[in-house]
Image (cartoon, rainbow, N blue to C red):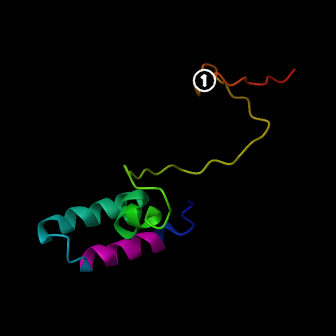
Amino acid sequence: MEVIDPGLLTAAALDHVATDPSLPDSGRHQAQEAVREDPAEALAHLVDPSDLVTAVPGATLAQASWSCEERTDYDPDAAWDADEWDLASDGVPVEEEV
């Protein structure tokens, strides 16, 4: 998923936190601060991970977590090291450019 408007995401999450009846007042301020600091926190207040898989036959949600990374543009000419990604030991041959 790509967040194209972090401000809109944050505003929606803040609205949700302000009106969420399941959130105790004692935790509301902390939740608002977390939403302001991290888009992943904002997303976590708006999306229920179990809703994403309940309609998938034969699947159940075992664990869910959110994290946020800045997007990096794909560079097909960039050099990378298979050892860095632990791909050299996974049994899959890695092609090397000659």
Q: Main secondary structure of the magenta part?
A: helix
User: Image check: 40 left or right of 86?
Assistant: left
User: Image check: 12 left or right of 19?
Assistant: right
Q: How many marks?
A: 1
Q: Residue furthest front?
A: 58
Give the vertical position of 65 relative to 35 (above or below): above
Is 50 included in the stretch rendered in magenta?
no
Please provide percent x and percent y for residue 68. Answer: 46, 51
Please provide percent x and percent y for residue 58. Answer: 48, 57
Give the vertical position of 62 relative to 36 (above or below): above
User: Image check: 7 left or right of 27?
Assistant: right
Name the residue located 72 percent from the left edge and 23 percent from the top edge. 93
Q: Nearer the viewer, residue 10 or 56?
A: 56
Name the residue located 56 percent from the left edge and 60 percent from the top edge. 1
Name the residue located 32 percent from the left edge and 76 percent from the top edge. 16
Tag 1: residue type? Asp
Q: Which residues fall within the magenta stretch?
A: 8-18
Q: Secondary structure at mark 1?
A: loop
Label 1 environment density (alpha carbons within 10 Å; few <14, some 14–19, many ≥20): few
Is 10 included in the stretch rendered in magenta?
yes
Name the residue located 41 percent from the left edge and 67 percent from the top edge. 51
- Residue tagged by mark 1? 90
Q: Nearer the viewer, residue 93 or 20?
A: 93
Please provide percent x and percent y for residue 73. Answer: 68, 48
Please provide percent x and percent y for residue 37. Answer: 36, 58
Q: Residue furthest right?
A: 98
Where is the C terminus found, in terms of image quarters? Answer: top right
